[in-house]
Image (cartoon, rainbow, N blue to C red):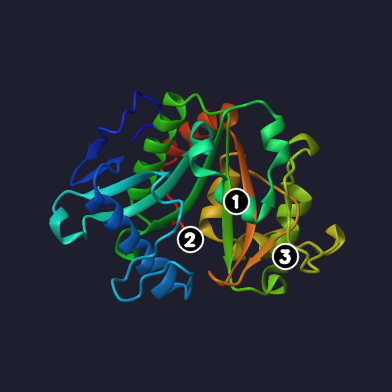
Amino acid sequence: MSIEPSAFAGQGSCSGSFEVRLAHSAADLRAAQRLRYRVFVEEMGGDGPLVDHAQKLECDALDPVFDHLLLVDKSRDPAAEAHVIGAYRLLPDTRLAAAGRFYCDAEFDLAPLHRSGRRLLELGRSCIDPAHRGGVGMLQMWQGLAEYVVQHDIGILFGAASFPGTDPAVFAQSLACLHHLHLAPEHLRVRATQTNGYRPLPQAELDRKHAMREMPPLIRAYLRLGGMVGEGVFIDKDFRTTDVCIILDTAHLTAQARSLAARNLTVTPQS
């Protein structure tokens, strides 16, 4: 499958029994929230003020403003709200007035991105059903994302990406690798707003092989696409994660994404 962008207006692209498209109904959104509950709450142990445990929905106040890019299993009945097997939340800066803020504003100072003057797209809540990890599903979703980026003339993608758990020391090598080898340039370097005492290991203590082994698969995939990180980490006690801010320049993303597809690499999202 090619990642070559094409017009993407939400109708979707199909491959076999899967379809990638934007959510266009309340049932679509609830199915995405239901999938997010299985991944972020049941699997990862997260929680939050709007999580609906009775209905098993992971909800967020900004959900109505985001676009929701979905991986849909066409063999499943949408009425049962189990047809969504992959999801990505997308918020272009053209909707910032309606949203009031980016989700990441609660974790990182995004002023450098705003000063860039380029069109921004926030990514978040990336997840895929465990039964479909390691297959072509995520690659299909990234093709849909590339098409969305072209349609909306996006220059910079960004979003929180997570390490499981609230102790950065557990992933000291991976976090040090990100800081020393993948730190965004100063003009794009967002910074964590939380004072939590985190300090990266000195570069002399970095074991790159160890760092990459313990790196969450989604973050590794972002790095393959030329991803960079902001400075510092945000400890999200509700989701029980340690978050970094990933930043992607789309001029680099397109060439890298085509190469990724040509090598038939796939990834498993974790945050």
Q: Quadrant of residue 133?
A: bottom left
Direction from residue 233 to residue 92 in the image, left or right: left
Q: Residue at x 37, y 43 (%)?
A: 141
Q: Position of residue 201 (x, y in %)?
A: 82, 64
Say which of marks 3 and 2 sits in front.
2
Q: Which amino acid, by three-letter code, is at mark 3?
A: Gln
Q: Which residue corresponds to mark 1?
A: 104
Q: State which tag comes first along the sequence, 3 or 1.
A: 1
Direction from residue 194 to residue 54 in the image, left or right: left
Q: Which residue corresponds to mark 3?
A: 173
Q: Residue at x 79, y 52 (%)?
A: 180
- Element type where label 2 sits in the image: loop
Q: Position of residue 181 (x, y in %)?
A: 75, 48
Q: Which residue corresponds to mark 2?
A: 270
Direction from residue 212 to residue 57 in the image, left or right: left
Q: State which tag comes first along the sequence, 3 or 2.
A: 3
